[in-house]
Amino acid sequence: MINTKPTILLVDDSQVNLEILKDALSKYVTYSAMDGDSALELALSREKPDLILLDIIMPGIDGFEVCKILKSNEATREIPVIFITGQNDMDSIIKGFEAGAVDFISKPFNILELKARVKTQVAIKMARDQNKRLIQKIEAINKKLTDSIEYAKKIQNASLPKKEDMDRLLPEYFVMLKPRDIVSGDFYWVSEIDSKVIIVAADCTGHGVPGAIMSMFGVAYLHEIINNRGETEPAKILDRLREIVIDSLQQDEKSEIKDGMDISIVTIDKTKKELQFAGAFNPIILIRNNFLNIYPADHMPVSYGEVDRSFRNHTINYENGDCLYMYSDGYASQFGGPNDKKLMQKGFRQIISELHPLPMEEQKDQLEKHFIDWKGSNDQIDDILVMGIRL
């Protein structure tokens, strides 16, 4: 049978005192030592006591030295020590606390005081041990969850376009994807149909695991609409995607789940030097000859919403060297800077405007550096996706 009573080590060079202590503390499990060396041996060689009552004046090493040794050893430093002594002068008391004691009990013993002080220190030790066990349990659960999410990240990353496909389909480009919580609600997707390249930048509702689940839905739905059904017009892709999301998640005006995604879709027709664009809340930026053009998105989500109409399709002629940017709102929403405010879209566009002449990979490096500097000690508040393509 496992003993659940608190254990106390009694250390005193007087057998009479030990008998008095054992009798007064009979509700606890007690064992004893009559000198410092024996006390150290017992404390280190068997199950650790929950409390030590320690005499100061003993043969060999005194109580102060025993306490210092106990507190210097990782195995025993958490055991509370109460000095039992006739030395009640201030210097001795200060020396005892400096050695690591939690309390003093004077000789000759006042039994009621002895029991009260011991009860208090045992209760504190039991509560501390319980907290430690709970923390260890929480840490174990957290590790298990984190390991699962880390594996989910591998699955999510595997669903993103392969680098070799990106390199084949796109000219100079970069992708900056920074999840807030290991896995991301932001995702990107690239495919080619009939010599047209379709590029998607999406921001699913939420972040972490819920956002990641929505992103996996989004990847699967886009594959069905574009690769299997051959749709290349961005507005029609969004219309069909919204229908599927609403139907799959059983959304209506009364449903609790209104999750969806803000998304921008661009189709590049290299033969016509033409872009088609449609967006749900997420606009795009096109920079030509150092002039920044913003192409607005429709203010309705890819999910059930108050507005129910077809998405608008924009046709844009492009020139060699134009820079196209597709992005979520995570970068612009980050708090930081000297006044701890959001960067905002204006600040984000200013950065893009300044960086666009640089090679795309260098633009990514500078965007990441600026984000770290801007964020400072603040937590990242959202997933971040920024894609840059030099046409």
Image (cartoon, rainbow, N blue to C red):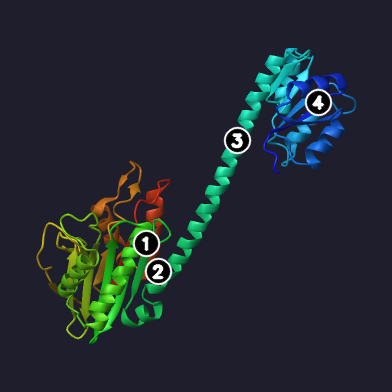
Number of labels in the image equals 4
Task: Determine the residue positioned at 68% across, 20% down.
Answer: 115
Residue 176 visible in the shown view: yes
Per the model, the C-alpha gap separating discs 1 and 3 is: 37 Å
Q: Which residue bears the numbered disc 1?
A: 184
**Circles 1 and 3: CB atoms closer than 8 Å:** no
Q: Are marks 4 and 2 in contact (CB under 8 Å)?
A: no
Label 4 is placed on what type of residue? Gly
Residue 224, located in which quarter of the rendered image? bottom left
Circle 1 — which element? loop
Image marks 1 and 2: residues in contact by CB distance under 8 Å: yes
Q: Which residue is denoted by mark 3 in the rendering?
A: 128
Q: CA distance from mark 4 to mark 3?
A: 24 Å
Q: Which mark is residue 156?
A: 2
Residue occupied by mark 4: 63
| Amino acid on which disc 1 is placed | Ser
Measured in 3D between alpha carbons, the distance from the residue under mark 4 to the one under mark 2, in whole angstroms, is 60 Å
Image side of residue 165 versus residue 197, left or right: right
